[in-house]
Amino acid sequence: MSVLFLEYPKCSTCKKAKAWLETAGVDFTDRHIVEQNPTKEELQAWHALSGLPLKKFFNTSGMLYKEMQLKDKLPQMSDEEQYELLSTNGMLVKRPLIIGEDFILVGFKEGEWERLK
């Protein structure tokens, strides 16, 4: 099984997740989340596959999220507007992301990632 791994290389959590993937022997394709920002269509597909609330795809602890005051703005935005916003800047997207054929993992929680082994 090969998965897509979206990361921001300077992110400490992403570094831990990448090391975990390598140690676990998981075959993955690496993608820089800022240089190759997820498209609106990718985000829609991943959100549908995840079964998670759309807010889980936002990097709520990021500086950009806070600067844009999205905590207050997101509840008033439609899903379509949120997908559009997420697709404008990879720093808004929660990371790392693992995308498989029939699943997606958002953020790094080692217990959840065990299924990749």
Image: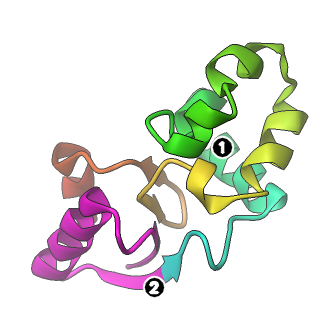
Rendered image quadrant of residue 69: top right
**Image label count:** 2
Q: Does the magenta stretch include residue 28?
A: yes
Instruction: Tell me the residue that label 1 is attached to.
Output: 47
The answer to whether 46 appears left or right of 80 in the picture is left
The answer to whether 75 appears left or right of 54 in the picture is right
- Mark 2 residue element: strand
Please state which amino acid type lies under the numbered disc 2: Thr
The residue at the far front in this view is 67
- Mark 1 residue element: helix
Tags 1 and 2 touching, CB below 8 Å: no
Q: Where is residue 40 in the image (x, y as percent from the top left)?
A: 82, 56
Q: Which mark is residue 22?
A: none
Magenta-highlighted residues: 1-30
Instruction: Tell me the residue that label 2 is attached to.
Output: 29
Q: Is residue 77 magenta?
A: no
Q: In this view, does 42 lie above or below 55?
A: below
**Residue 43 in view of the camera:** yes
